[in-house]
Amino acid sequence: MNGWMGTILRVDLGTKNIVTQALDPQYARDYIGGRGFNSYVLFNELPLGIDPLSPDNIFAMAPGVLSGTPLGLTSRLEVSTLSPYSGILGDGNAGESMAFMMKRAGLDQLIVTGRANHPVYLRIHNAKAELYDASDLWGMSTWEVTDILRNRHGKTCSVASIGQAGENLVRFASTMIDKYGSAARGSGAVLGSKNLKAIVVSGDMHVALADEAAFKQLAKEDYKFIKASSFQQDIVAKYGTHIGMMMWEPGFRNSESCMSADDVPEALRPESWKQYETGRVGCHGCHVKCKNRYRIPSGRRAGETGEALEFECIYCLGTNCGILDPIPIMEMENLCDAYGMDVIALGNTIAMAKDLYSRGLLTSAQTGGLSLDWEDADAQVELVHATALRQGFGNLVAEGMYGLAEQLGNTAMELCYHVKGLSRGTYPPGVFALAHATSTRGADHLRGRSWAFNQVDPDIFPVLKEHGLMIENPDADPAPALIVGERITTLSDCTGRCKGGVNNWICAMPLCWKKPIFGGLVDLLTAACGVPYTVEELERAADRIYTLEHAFNICRGVRRRHDSLPQKPELYHSAEGAAERQLHEAHVTRYYQLRGYDEHTGVPTAKRLEELGLDGVAERLKTCQETSNWNGPPLWDEAEYPQGTKRV
């Protein structure tokens, strides 16, 4: 095959059966790669009603169809599973070098099922795989494991691993790629439940291109445009997502308020982070290098280095938890990477717990004496350790925001600003709120790229506006704008393309400045795969994948009421709050109508499913509607979880 490698690898850890499967060309064309492949497998192969931490769950990992090609910014990997954090679709998109290396190893997808009877790791080289004993690695951090496995199998190997958080089944444990890339939404806990400590991949195969000369010319044009972009070079390459501290109004103290640029302390502003920076890094094949490499100058971890401290960590574990000192923020970033935990989920859970504590709704007796005062950075760092090791109050925090609120009671749920178990804080009705409500993995900032409609990028927005694709005020009618964003991010996740360090179209959708908005991608896919895609076909593929994910969640009990608008308690119980919810519901109805979903239930119509080539989905949805109701993931008794092992 061209573009694709033509091989899917399946591993059953229970039986130790490892088989390769030929990639079906029609399947490849319809679902493209990456996220599309994974979402298809989860919908069609995952049993209903299972516990996400049972051996029955599926762990799927896939590069994009354009990963491993000469096109830059294509080293994004999709990791998908039934999330133990939310109980619905859980996928994470991570960078570093695994997507590139999977293609070099001759693979389009890895599917892992079952549970090993002791710790193991999976070694893959050129589409051949073998399981190794990992008893000596159990209890180690992701940093230690990555170094050890690269010493064993070669420095150029890419390593996906879990740390102690995954072993202890922390609900939001991540699969860590090459130490610093985080595939979130609980996939690390799924690997822990399967006794799979790591996946090591290498190879020396090459991606065949149908029209190599044409593809390389297009890739060269894309490269030159990004290198000439003042936005990319002066903002993204210099500051990365740190610029978000001045542009994206990070939440403060569990979204008590949103911080304007003037509110952000000097120590947390982009220029201030430069004093800790020792270099700039990027994922494999990236010519932007949006990530920082840094050294902690003082404190408990003085001299320790780290990489890719993003806006999300500064916001979620910093300002939203009341921590305004950069030193403990860097320390917590490193701890999360080494333990293998998602900084967003952990930060939001701690922020909610601190909010409850500050209101007297959570006591020091319940926390085991651990302070949850807003400014107490030392206690928060200790809580990060306790969460990863499931010790003391950390055992409850490890259940995640929704799980913690559910166990603490109804009052706690009022301060749990979530959509389907995930949180992005509170927003008024509009494109942000609608994007969070309709995201197929819960409230999320990377599913619809909603803010890209008013992002100030002088290099591309005039072009989009010229072609009628720039929407000046999407909050007035957010549904059409959001659907365009959802298509773009879906295709980005299928092709392996980076969505961009600072939320911009030219990264997520290559050549969109040349043939807005999908025309450039049509040319790239045609040259790579030899498949004569059209713009309409790509739009239909994106809608097919998004609708299948929506159907997957319906089968897990998600209903229209779950596409909700999180509100603070005082607003929720007011006339103003009721009016906001009414407006949000109108936006949801409009979105369903444009998507081809029943406006009362949110279930895709039989007509729309047929149009998308999803004929067999309707009957399953009919059955699911009668039998299931989402209420978060099934939780275990605290005493049933594994605990402890070595502290980082």
Image (cartoon, helix red, strand yellow):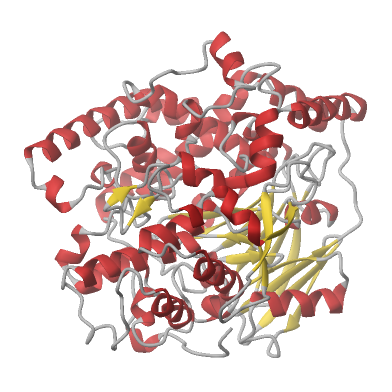
Q: Is residue 153 left or right of residue 291?
A: right
Q: Please give left or right for residue 158 compared with residue 321 in the image.
A: right
State the image quarter where residue 465 is shown: top right
Q: In the displayed structure, would residue 367 be above or below residue 335?
A: below
Say whether residue 616 is visible.
no
Against 494, residue 168 (above or below) is below
Q: Position of residue 327 (x, y in %)?
A: 53, 69
Residue displayed at 26% across by 43% down: 565
Residue 639, image x and y in percent? 35, 89
Of residues 432 and 636, the one nearer the viewer is 432
- Residue 444 seen from this side: yes
Q: Is residue 31 left or right of residue 190?
A: right
Return the x and y of residue 490 as percentages of the image width and height. Answer: 56, 37
Which of the two residues, 332 or 448, is positioned nearer the viewer here?
Answer: 332
Q: In the rendered view of the protein, which quadrant contains the C terminus?
A: bottom right
Nearer to me, 150 or 370? 370
**Figure quadrant of the N terminus:** top right
Q: Position of residue 118 (x, y in %)?
A: 63, 87
Give the answer, above or below, for where 190 lies relative to 614: below
The vertical placement of 168 against 455, above or below, is below
Of residues 495 and 301, the one nearer the viewer is 301
In this rendering, position of residue 101 left or right of residue 618: right
State the residue at coordinates (30%, 25%).
590
Specify the quadrant of the image occupied by residue 224.
Answer: top right
How many marks the image carries: the answer is: 0
Query: Which residue occupies 69% across, 29% down?
Result: 230
